[in-house]
Image (cartoon, helix red, strand yellow):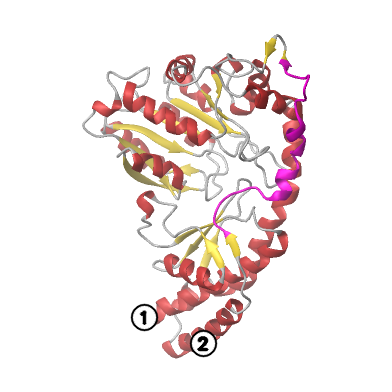
Amino acid sequence: MAQLTTLRADDLRDLQRRARERYDDFARRGLKLNLTRGKPSSAQLDLCNELLEMPGRRDYMSGAIDCRNYGELQGLPELRALLAPIYDVTPDRMVLGGNTSLGLMHDAVVYALLKGTCDSARPWSKESRIAFICAVPGYDRHFSICNEFGIEMLTVPLHDDGPDMDAVEKLVAADPQIKGMWCVPKYSNPSGAVYSQEKIERLARMPAAAPDFRLFWDNAYAVHHLTPERVRIANIDAACARHGNRNRAFIFGSTSKVTLAGSGFGLFGGSKDNVAWYLKRMEKRTIGGDKINQLRHVRLLQNAAGVDRLMDRHRAIIAPKFAQVRTTFESNLAATSVARWTDPPGGYFITLDVLDGCAKQVVKLAKEAGVELTPAGATHPHGNDPRDSTIRIAPTFPEPTEIAQAAEGVAVCVLLATVEKLLTSK
């Protein structure tokens, strides 16, 4: 960003005039574009329309299990066997839940608050305070769960290869009231960071003052690749067991962005003790999940190769959208050095970092010009980005023809907000 910061006030005012003209021209188009949430597009949902006709009036058996009936609290063995390798657990250590992993994460926090974990001396709610570590930028709905239940959030920086482990280890070793940490280990929301093997090992082995400390391992984007390379990460469950912390990881995933976003299912995995603990709590609220939906997913996906084929088709739809955002940002912003953006190898988001103190103004300008963005600050607890610099871009939902326009509008807003910010300091 040094190029603009070294300009004289007269040059900045000239640049402001030109940026304002571009902005006004864009606003006059009267567009209504939305880059707020990481939703699959209609074209992606169409890939799994076969589910709407499955399993059929006579195809309701999974082995000896009548999927129309109650039972099988843990979920269909057939589907658990299909999915378990993706999440690095065995089928007996996986639980299939409702239509989102967010619901399972919410329930795990509530269960721990009310009952404690299998390693807790008492319910978490009986502690004087509870804290979670939150790597930032991060996922706003993780922060919302903590906020809902009065859980203190302690932030650490998230780098391209995972969280700042020096900061994490120092916090966890010193404070027994730190009971959890949110982790999106592959293609992290919103930066696309991928945790390195070294950092996963450190998370698994680090000393924790709380004997019931848990990693809330939200592997939401396990198969959501944006390049031909199918990135693999280290097995957190095996690493925790190897370092004598076999119950440390609560593993979550879902089919929300694999099949039909509102009609998939979430999953919980982990150690034998963690799964037994979760099922004991879960059995009080349900007699069994939607096995018809589980069965039709078995019929559609068939095996691990079937998952890969489906995700390749997703990639063919959304990877060009990510590329278009990058190309537009580069052509409009790279020469001025007023912003940085990530080039994620997978996931659903791009992180756009602008000059400190400008993110809220960029979002405001964009909205007034017809481009809706996630609120500035959503990437940090309580919606408070102390630098006011990070914006989450969600390219998946808009139509391809809309992406270039939306990215152009954002770029123009970045230029205008930056110049105006610099002028106030002259």
- Left-right relation of 209 to 205: left
Q: Secondary structure at mark 2?
A: helix
* Residue 107 appearing in the image: yes
- Quarter of the image with the C terminus in it: bottom left
Q: Residue at x 50, y 22 (%)?
A: 270
CA gap, disc 1 and disc 2: 15 Å
Instruction: Locate residue 158, reporting x and y percent.
Output: 45, 47
Residue type (three-letter) at the residue carrying disc 1: Thr
Q: How many marks?
A: 2
CB atoms of marks 1 and 2 within 8 Å? no
Instruction: Locate residue 358, reporting x and y percent.
Output: 43, 69
Name the mark on residue 424: 1
Name above or below for residue 39 compared with residue 401: above
Instruction: Locate residue 351, reporting x and y percent.
Output: 53, 56
**Residue bearing mark 2:** 17
Instruction: Locate residue 280, reporting x and y percent.
Output: 44, 15
Name the mark on residue 59: none
Q: Secondary structure at mark 1?
A: helix
Find the residue positioned furthest to the bottom. Answer: 10
Residue 207, located in which quarter of the rendered image?
top left
Give, as a single range, the part of the protein colored magenta. 35-61
Say whether residue 55 is magenta: yes
Q: Pick whichever, 367 or 227, lies toward us.
A: 367
Q: Residue at x 52, y 48 (%)?
A: 160
Residue type (three-letter) at the residue carrying disc 2: Arg
Residue 147, located in which quarter of the rendered image?
top left
N-term mark: 1 or 2: 2
Mark 1 neighbour class, 10 Å CA radius: few under 14, some 14 to 19, many 20 or more: few
- Left-right relation of 21 to 378: right
Find the residue positioned furthest to the front. Answer: 57
